[in-house]
């Protein structure tokens, strides 16, 4: 019993008729109370939910317990006596037992061993009984039981989670049990094992209870739920005898067997558990002790169940697990091969189970044999697995994953094209389109990065791709790409059938370089089968060996075949359980004598044939849907309720042919979606084999139309491959041109989608199929579709290397089109094909020809002269304009000009390589076209390149830079990606350095390279990499870092670079390597990275003059560094041969700079005047650049000028220019030139004999070379100086207190750094900028920033010369040796600087582990103080050299330390504010998601409503047919006056009801956008007369006058929709009569206008009724809108809405005017066509010749049979009517009778009208027999369906005699009107 406060809590609940006296148990959902009945004082137990209504989940739980209790008889369970609902609260009333909770009993009393055994036996008996009723308790724990404290009788009190066996274990059960009873959960209940939850789960939980019962504690005690789950899965329990040494070993063994992790290792039956416990109890009572006896003697299950364990795969399993251990270094690829049914999937499931404790992300995909045309289909399935798993991740995991994915760049969004459901995780960022090849590479890279991002050391990825022999080409190509990509933490297992190459493709096309591990699964041996049989039958392998030998003979060791064989033997009684002997028995002789199938397919077919016919038919439809199918779709196709189909499938599930899927995604409305999967593709194959090819095609065609009708445009786009698959499979049944065109367009849509995912081979197949389905005549009716189809087919043909086919298609296209721009567009595809084939010269020549056809001439002769002439013309074109004016030019509209721009752009790259003289002409033509016609997409590139041409011809850097700025300003998101990136490359390589510092281009060029990689544009990435590396060489960046960076960017990822080619930067890397002193004293670019003897000829052969020019320039620099002037001059001459290739480029002034210094150096030695003159010439050329771009070249010119003055003897001028060169090099951050200037100035003072001055400048030169990292010069200078030590004291640690002269500091650097730091408030970005600044300016190799967080010191960020960005660590210094802890703590304590010139030499910190292990040479540590408050500490180190931190650098950092501190504090405050903003943003996002969910729910409801209306059409029209038909037939019989009145009442009421139904159905069609109209001739006056007849009765009944007038000018016969006109007028006139009590209703029809072919009529309906208030006129046309009045007039509120819609849909207009108490007027206009032919009246049709006609009437409804028969007798004399109630009976009647016509209902049981019609048409002699369909479906598509089924015509219900007469006459009389088809 519970404490008094709990009792008090429940006594507050008033339960009429009961008084609560005790609380037995309570939890979060339900309470069990003891109470007394007020009436008689009888004690009862009450179970009440702790919810607030009968709708609460807890109340539902009560209802569930009530239902379950009714399904079993058990005295040891509480007996329900009543179920009550009082005040909306649901109660269960139980017969009272004087018991208490078992848990309380055990806590208060220490029972004896015998008492404990008695309790255990009772518990086992209760659970055993439930299992006998096929009920699993799912919640065996002490809290579920009561015990009588006196008699020790145990009673089951809680079965809230109990359910019938065979049902999937609900997820909410798992969540509840994890929350409330994790200590008793079984491993399979956790959801972490791929094992079904069955009765053995209860056995495990009982074992936990018994463990606690006999030891006093559960086996696993953890406070954390996750830890408990892990214990149940992976930790072995302590033996009970260890805890309770008095416990007998036998009992301990029983308990341990109960709680085995693997269900197969536990007791299998509760009866065996009880039997062993009883045995122990008897021994204890009779012998006083429990002996060690054998257990589980009776543990043989009478249920036939084949174990799911893996047999005979131990070696292969171990091989895979060993491979898995190596994926941390390199991903592994397992090629798993084996025949069908060999157990590949089971093998992978076993691997997954083995890896369950390693946090493995498991994704799987399976290829479909019958649908191999889904691009990346197997990966789409695998990624869908990830989406399904996503909801099970916690918010933190989700956040981390999203952050990691987004860090990979926006290109990852392209993965959503493969798996649209990923958009809910990644978001959907539309990326600009790319050229086909680049798009393909981008997708491969994005998908690779996606998988690599998911896979981490903490969560490795296991990707299982099954049945790859059926994989699509795109998937196979990507597997190869992924196989060779340098990934980690990924294991891919690709399974395919035997005798196929790796990953299911022919070995000749397998391009993977990484060798996949191949594992072949062979058939099982006799030993393995004997073990399987022993486990299945509870026997021993020795005993089962003979049976195993027999089975091996018949199955050849195939696991699937063995499984089916055993199932068959059991089904047929050859394997049976002997209850007497308690064992499984078989007769080998009888088994051998039995003739059974000799293949697995035959066995499965036999199993299918044993199913009921309805289940077989259902499975046939399911197999045609695919391996996976959902219940909703299948039920809809079969036209059956969901529950009926589910019942039919239950039989197949029981036979293990299909299985119910877990974790199926819900519908958009959140409703559960039930889906199934065939257990093996052979099952699906066997079922499909049961029907003919034509039958398959008919079903697949119906599936296609089913999906097409029901999918929204968005859903159709997502599932287009599936829809097209069904139509293509049934292609032979597409008979009409319209059908084939419709499917052709669907194939085109699928091709477009496949093309967008770069699956060009599949896209081509779809386009090809579309092409086959259309006729050439379509060009005249749908030119645009044909044109696009041919273009796409040709494009994908060349992309799949079908070049001849592409040429053929292009040739056909050129003949089919006339327009000039179309010709040019087609030839553009041809150009792209030639470029793709690397036939660049042909591409350029064709491009020039295309341009000529567009009126654009490109001269190919006298190119140089033409370039100058075209350039002069371009100058004339922009006379009076500034470059900036070009931004304001209009958008190019001329189609020929646009095509010309596209054509030129397509050949510029090719021209650059094969016709370099033509290249500038192309650019100048693009420029001219832009000036003439306005800006096009390609114009920014033209302007940037034009700027380069200006510089090359005129050397006008300012104009070049301005044109570059114009190009950049014109770039925006909508630009073509390739144009945008190439413009950025030209701008940063040429335009930008013409007006800005070279340093400004470096970061942008690196980003451009990254973008090129992401976009898959390898060519662009190579060019950008070349430009970036060249700029690094010129920038003065640290050489060691620059080299690492260049190597890192010299090879693109494998995904876009399958050839693993480099970016051709080896020569520049070798140049840097030489400067790093890695190659000795050589001036050649030959070493570890490059060999110029081999490389230069290759460059020359490729006509890459600019690259050769670059190499010679850097060789010139090496000669300058070594002082080898002769070799330098030789390289100058070689470079001059190629300088024309680089006019106007940044390399030219560098060439002039090095050339002038080399000539001056040579002159100094030889005094040759020509050398001096040459040097002066180059210096003069350099001056032009220095004057125009001083930021990059003025310091170089000053140095060249100083050298000239030095060698000329003008010492004073030389000194002045040296100082200028040094200062400007420092200001512009060219450390390499600063070092050179210092070195030359030192030489100057040496020549003057001023050694002290020379020492000063050589020391500064050394410092600068060290900062640059030029080890070659460092060695040269230190060697030159010998033992003379010019550096600072390296042995004494210095604490700096003195101040140096501020004038000596670099003030510009201080100001820039201060501005940069103070402008940044984002903490991470601030740290990034801070660390980058100090590394670049302090000469450090690595830097760390340390912050005190709550008294503990943490490394917040780290930056090294090898890191592009700072690394955020958040690492306590006490836990790492990255930094010297002693120095850091010293600075934090004393707030003073520490500078160590050699940290290894004796000093207070030299013994620090970090210094010892890292061999730190130079160290610097300074505090960051803000108004005396210590914010953090900056620590820097250099392990390459001593004395790295110069005094001025230290002073610079000290000056900035205050700004650093202020900025850090501001950033922390900003981060805290940002965190609060993010929290609020997250709250808003949650609200937004909730709104979105509500929106989805509304949309789902709308779909349900549409389906309801469709069903209602059939269900209501069918009885209405009988009612209206009967009422019409009554008038043909003699009637009294009163009977006539009654009959009229029935007729008018039913017609009124039908009008209401039509309104509702029309409303549904309007909402669904499926309204339709017919155009046919009709006599308008006749229609008005009919209408008058209908409404006249209504007017007369109310005593009002009905006036109808029609203009005499209106033609008698018109063409339009008479039924819709009748509907509109009937609605308006009926409304007018309803709301008019006196006066009149007038209808006026006039002619508004007319011509020879058409008329426009005006219709007016006026009444003198109650009128409408003005404020209500605005919404009377809304749906369900009704005017409030005192008349209580009935109606649906849809009439006016539908009438107005009908008018507007036909091109008319409706208005209304009204005044209260005066009346209302509705007016509308409608257009009609004139009709020349006269309509023949139905009454004029002579039916005499049809007397005695034999008619077969096929109708299932009795009343409709009567109506139809009577109508037939009315219109035909003496008809012979034969009645059949369904299609099957109709076929039988045809065997017995000869008939003239068949009247066929559509929807009937047994066999519907479509099926029956097809069967009739398939018979000999019945091809021309007329069949008229009766249908309730009035949609336009019904005609096509009826015709497709072989029917001649159709008529909609209710059947009207005149219509039926007309239809029959049309079919049987030769001159009658033709039918609808």
Image (cartoon, helix red, strand yellow):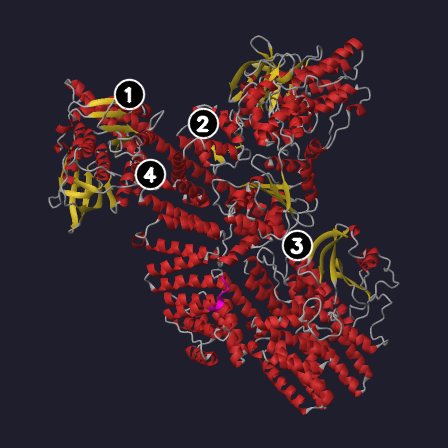
Disc 4 secondary structure class: helix
Q: Which mark is on residue 1469?
A: 3
Circle 2 is placed at which residue position?
Answer: 616
**Vertical position of residue 868 compared to residue 926: above or below:** below
Query: Residue at position x 50%, y 49% from top?
Result: 417
Mark 4 or 1, which is nearer the eye? 1
Query: Residue at position x 43%, y 48% from top?
Result: 750
**Vertical position of residue 931 compared to residue 1387: above or below:** below
Q: Earlier in the sequence, mark 4 or mark 1?
A: 4
Distance CA(mark 2)–CA(mark 3): 70 Å
Disc 1 secondary structure class: helix
Circle 1 is placed at which residue position?
Answer: 1758
Among all residues in the image, which is located at the extreme right? 1402
Distance CA(mark 2)–CA(mark 4): 36 Å
Residue 992: percent from the left, percent from the top?
Answer: 56, 72
Distance CA(mark 1)–CA(mark 3): 84 Å
Q: Nearer the viewer, residue 530 or 397?
A: 530
- Magenta stretch: includes residue 774: no
* Crowding at mark 1 (Cα within 10 Å: few <14, some 14-19, many 20+): few
The residue stretch that appears in magenta: 837-841
Distance CA(mark 2)–CA(mark 1): 31 Å
Answer with the quarter of the image where residue 1668 lies.
top left
Distance CA(mark 4)–CA(mark 1): 30 Å
């Amino acid at each position: 019993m519970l404490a008094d406060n709990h009792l008090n809590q429940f006594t507050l609940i008033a339960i009429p008729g009961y008084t609560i006296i005790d609380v037995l148990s309570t939890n979060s959902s339900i309470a069990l109370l003891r109470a007394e009945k007020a009436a008689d004082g009888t004690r009862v137990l009450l179970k009440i939910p702790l919810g607030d209504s009968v709708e609460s989940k807890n109340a539902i739980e009560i209802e569930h317990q009530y239902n379950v209790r009714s399904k079993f008889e058990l005295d040891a369970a509480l007996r329900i006596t009543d179920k009550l609902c009082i005040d909306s609260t649901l109660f269960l009333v139980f017969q009272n037992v004087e018991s208490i909770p078992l848990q309380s009993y055990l806590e208060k009393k220490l029972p004896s061993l015998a008492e404990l055994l008695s309790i255990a036996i009772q518990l086992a008996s209760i659970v055993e009984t439930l299992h006998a009723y096929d009920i699993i308790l799912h919640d065996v724990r002490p809290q579920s039981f009561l015990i009588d404290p006196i008699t020790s009788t145990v009673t089951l009190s809680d079965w809230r989670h109990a359910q019938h066996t065979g049902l999937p274990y609900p997820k909410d059960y798992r969540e509840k049990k994890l929350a409330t009873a994790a200590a008793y959960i079984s491993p399979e209940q956790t959801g972490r094992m791929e094992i079904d939850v069955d009765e053995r789960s209860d056995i495990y939980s009982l074992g936990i209870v018994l463990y606690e019962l006999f030891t006093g504690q559960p086996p696993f005690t953890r406070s954390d739920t996750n830890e408990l789950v892990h214990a149940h899965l992976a930790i072995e329990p302590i033996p009970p005898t260890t805890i309770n040494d008095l416990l007998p070993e036998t009992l301990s063994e029983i308990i341990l067997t109960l709680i085995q992790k693997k269900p197969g290792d536990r007791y299998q039956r509760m009866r065996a558990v009880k039997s062993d416990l009883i045995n122990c109890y008897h021994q204890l009572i009779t012998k006083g002790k429990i002996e060690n006896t054998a257990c589980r003697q009776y543990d043989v299950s009478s249920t036939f169940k084949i174990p799911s364990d893996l047999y005979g795969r131990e070696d292969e399993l171990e091989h895979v697990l060993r491979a898995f251990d190596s994926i941390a270094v390199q991903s592994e690829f397992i090629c798993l091969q084996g025949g069908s049914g060999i157990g590949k999937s089971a093998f992978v499931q076993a691997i997954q189970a083995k890896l369950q404790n390693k946090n493995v992300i498991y994704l799987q995909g399976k290829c479909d044999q019958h649908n191999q045309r889904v691009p990346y289909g197997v990966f789409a399935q695998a990624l869908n697995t990830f989406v399904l798993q996503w909801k099970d991740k916690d918010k933190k995991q989700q956040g981390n994953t999203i952050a990691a994915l987004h860090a990979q760049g926006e290109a990852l969004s392209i993965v959503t094209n493969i798996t649209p459901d990923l958009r809910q995780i990644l978001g959907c960022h539309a990326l600009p389109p790319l050229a086909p090849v680049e798009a393909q590479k981008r997708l491969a890279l994005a998908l690779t990065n996606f998988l690599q991002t998911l896979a981490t050391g903490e969560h490795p990825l296991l990707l299982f791709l099954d049945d790859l022999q059926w994989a699509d080409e795109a998937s196979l190509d990507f597997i190869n790409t992924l196989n060779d990509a340098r990934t980690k933490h990924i294991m891919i297992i690709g399974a395919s059938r035997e005798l196929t190459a790796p990953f299911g493709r022919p070995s000749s096309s397998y391009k993977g370089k990484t060798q996949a591990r191949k594992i072949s699964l062979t058939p099982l041996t006799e030993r393995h089968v004997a073990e399987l049989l022993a486990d299945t039958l509870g026997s021993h392998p020795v005993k089962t060996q003979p049976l195993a030998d027999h089975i091996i003979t018949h199955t050849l060791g195939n696991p699937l075949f063995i499984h089916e064989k055993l199932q068959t033997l059991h089904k047929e009684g050859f394997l049976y359980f002997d209850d007497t002997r308690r064992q499984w028995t078989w007769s080998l002789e009888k088994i051998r004598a039995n003739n059974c199938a000799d293949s697995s397919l035959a066995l499965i077919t036999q199993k299918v044939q044993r199913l009921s016919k309805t289940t077989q038919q259902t499975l046939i439809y399911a197999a045609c849907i695919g391996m996976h199918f959902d219940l909703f779709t299948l039920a809809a196709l079969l036209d059956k309720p969901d529950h009926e189909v589910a019942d039919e499938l239950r039989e197949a599930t029981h036979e293990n042919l299909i299985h119910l899927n877990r974790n199926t995604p819900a519908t958009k409305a959140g409703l559960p979606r039930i889906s199934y999967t065939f257990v093996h593709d052979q099952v699906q194959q066997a079922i499909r084999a049961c029907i003919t090819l034509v039958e398959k095609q008919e079903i697949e065609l119906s599936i296609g139309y089913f999906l097409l009708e029901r999918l929204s445009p968005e859903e159709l786009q997502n599932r287009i491959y599936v829809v097209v698959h069904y139509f293509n499979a049934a292609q032979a049944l597409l008979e009409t041109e319209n059908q084939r065109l419709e499917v052709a367009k669907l194939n085109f849509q699928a091709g477009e989608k496949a093309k967008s995912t770069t699956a060009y081979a599949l896209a081509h197949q779809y386009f090809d199929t579309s092409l086959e389905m259309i006729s050439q005549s379509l060009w005249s009716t749908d030119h645009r579709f044909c044109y696009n189809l041919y273009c796409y087919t040709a494009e994908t043909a060349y992309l799949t290397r079908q070049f001849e086919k592409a040429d053929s298609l292009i040739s056909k296209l050129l003949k089919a089109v006339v327009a000039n721009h179309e010709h040019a567009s087609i030839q553009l595809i041809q150009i792209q094909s030639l470029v793709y084939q690397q036939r660049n010269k042909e591409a350029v020549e064709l491009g020039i020809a295309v341009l000529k056809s567009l009126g654009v001439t490109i001269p190919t002769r006298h190119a140089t002269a033409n370039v100058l002439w075209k350039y002069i013309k371009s100058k004339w074109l922009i006379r009076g304009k500034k470059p900036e004016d070009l931004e304001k030019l209009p958008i190019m509209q001329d189609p020929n000009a646009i095509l010309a721009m596209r054509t030129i752009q397509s050949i510029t790259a090719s021209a650059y390589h094969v016709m370099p003289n033509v290249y500038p002409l192309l650019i100048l033509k693009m420029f001219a076209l832009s000036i003439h016609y306005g800006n096009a997409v390609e114009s920014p590139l033209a302007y940037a390149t034009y700027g380069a041409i200006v510089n090359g011809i005129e050397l006008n850097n300012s104009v070049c830079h301005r044109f570059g700025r114009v190009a950049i300003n014109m770039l925006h998101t909508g630009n073509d990606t390739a144009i945008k990136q190439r413009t950025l490359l030209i701008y940063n390589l040429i335009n930008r350095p013409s007006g800005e510092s070279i340093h400004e281009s470096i970061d942008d060029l690196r980003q451009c390279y990254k973008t090129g990689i992401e976009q898959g544009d390898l060519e662009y990435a190579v060019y950008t990499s070349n430009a970036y590396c060249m700029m690094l060489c010129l920038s003065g960046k640290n050489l060691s870092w620059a080299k690492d960076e260049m190597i890192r960017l010299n090879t693109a990822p494998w995904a876009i670079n399958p050839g693993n080619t480099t970016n051709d930067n080896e020569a520049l890397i070798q140049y840097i390597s030489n400067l790093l002193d890695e190659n000795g004293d050589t001036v050649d670019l030959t070493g570890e990275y490059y060999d110029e003897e081999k490389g230069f000829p290759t460059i020359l052969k490729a006509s890459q003059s600019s690259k050769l020019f670059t190499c010679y320039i850097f060789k010139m620099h090496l000669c300058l560094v070594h002082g080898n002037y002769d070799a330098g001059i030789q390289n100058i001459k070689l470079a001059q041969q190629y300088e024309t290739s680089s006019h106007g480029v940044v390399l030219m002034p560098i060439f002039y700079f090095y050339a002038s210094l080399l000539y001056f150096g040579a002159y100094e030695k030889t005094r040759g005047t020509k050398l001096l003159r040459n040097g002066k010439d180059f210096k003069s050329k350099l001056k032009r650049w220095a004057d125009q771009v001083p930021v990059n070249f003025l310091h170089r010119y000053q140095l060249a000028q100083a050298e000239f003055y030095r060698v000329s003897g003008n010492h004073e001028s030389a000194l002045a220019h040296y100082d200028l060169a040094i200062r400007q090099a420092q200001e512009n951050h060219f450390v390499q030139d600063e070092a050179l200037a210092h070195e030359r100035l030192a030489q100057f003072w040496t020549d003057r004999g001023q050694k002290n001055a020379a020492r000063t400048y050589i020391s500064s030169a050394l410092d600068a070379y060290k900062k640059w990292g030029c080890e070659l010069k460092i060695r040269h200078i230190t060697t030159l100086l010998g033992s003379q030590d010019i550096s600072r004291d390296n042995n004494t640690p210095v604490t700096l207190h003195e101040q140096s002269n501020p004038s000596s500091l670099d003030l510009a650097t201080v100001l820039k750094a201060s501005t940069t730091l103070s402008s940044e408030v984002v903490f991470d970005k601030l740290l990034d900028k801070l660390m980058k600044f100090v590394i670049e300016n302090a000469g450090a190799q690595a830097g760390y920033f340390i912050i005190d967080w709550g008294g503990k010191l943490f490394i917040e960020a780290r930056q090294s010369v090898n890191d592009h960005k700072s690394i955020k660590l958040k690492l306590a210094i006490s836990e790492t040796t990255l930094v010297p802890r002693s120095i850091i703590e010293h600075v934090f304590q004393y707030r003073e600087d520490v500078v160590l010139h050699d940290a290894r030499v004796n000093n207070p910190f030299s013994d620090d582990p970090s210094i010892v292990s890292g061999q730190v040479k130079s160290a610097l540590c300074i505090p960051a103080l803000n108004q005396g408050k210590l914010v953090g500490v900056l620590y820097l180190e250099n392990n390459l050299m001593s004395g790295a931190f110069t005094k001025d650098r230290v002073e610079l950092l000290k000056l900035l330390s205050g700004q650093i501190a202020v900025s850090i504090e501001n950033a922390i405050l900003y981060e805290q504010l940002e965190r609060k903003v993010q929290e609020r943003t997250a709250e808003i996002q949650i609200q937004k998601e909730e709104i979105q969910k509500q929106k989805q729910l509304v949309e789902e409801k709308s779909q349900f409503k549409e389906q309801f209306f469709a069903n209602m059409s059939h269900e209501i029209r069918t009885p209405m047919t009988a009612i209206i038909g009967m009422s019409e037939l009554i008038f043909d019989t003699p009637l009294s006056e009163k009977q006539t009145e009654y009959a009229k009442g029935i007729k008018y009421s039913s017609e009124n009801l039908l009008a209401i139904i039509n309104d509702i159905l029309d409303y549904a069609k309007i909402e669904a956008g499926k309204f339709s109209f017919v155009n046919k001739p009709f006599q308008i006056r006749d229609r008005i007369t009919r209408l008058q007849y209908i409404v006249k009765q209504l007017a007369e009944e109310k005593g009002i006058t009905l006036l109808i007038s029609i203009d005499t000018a209106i033609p008698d016969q018109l063409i339009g929709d008479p039924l819709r006109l009748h509907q509109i007028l009937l609605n308006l006139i009926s409304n007018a009569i309803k709301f008019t009590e006196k006066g009149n209703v007038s209808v006026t029809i006039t002619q508004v206008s007319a011509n020879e072919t058409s008329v426009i009529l005006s219709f007016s309906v006026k009444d003198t009724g109650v009128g409408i208030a003005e404020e209500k006129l605005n919404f009377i046309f809304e749906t369900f809108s009704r005017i409030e009045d005192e008349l209580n007039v009935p109606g649906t509120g849809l009439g006016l809405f539908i009438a107005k819609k009908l008018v507007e849909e036909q091109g008319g207009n409706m208005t209304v005017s009204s005044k209260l108490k005066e009346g209302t007027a509705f007016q509308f206009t409608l257009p009609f066509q004139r009709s020349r032919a006269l309509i023949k009246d139905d009454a004029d049709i002579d039916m005499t010749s049809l007397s005695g006609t034999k008619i077969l009437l096929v109708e299932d409804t009795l009343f409709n049979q009567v109506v139809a028969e009577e109508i037939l007798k009315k219109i035909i004399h003496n008809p012979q009517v034969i009645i059949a109630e369904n299609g099957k009976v109709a076929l039988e009647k045809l065997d017995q009778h000869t008939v003239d016509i068949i009247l066929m209902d559509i929807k009937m049981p047994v066999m519907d009208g479509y099926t029956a019609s097809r069967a009739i048409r398939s018979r000999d002699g019945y091809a021309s027999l007329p069949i008229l369909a009766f249908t309730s479906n009035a949609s336009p598509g019904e005609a096509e369906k009826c015709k497709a089924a072989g029917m001649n015509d159709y008529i909609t219900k209710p059947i009207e005699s005149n219509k039926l007469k007309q239809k029959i006459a049309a079919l049987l009389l030769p001159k009658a009107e033709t039918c609808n088809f």
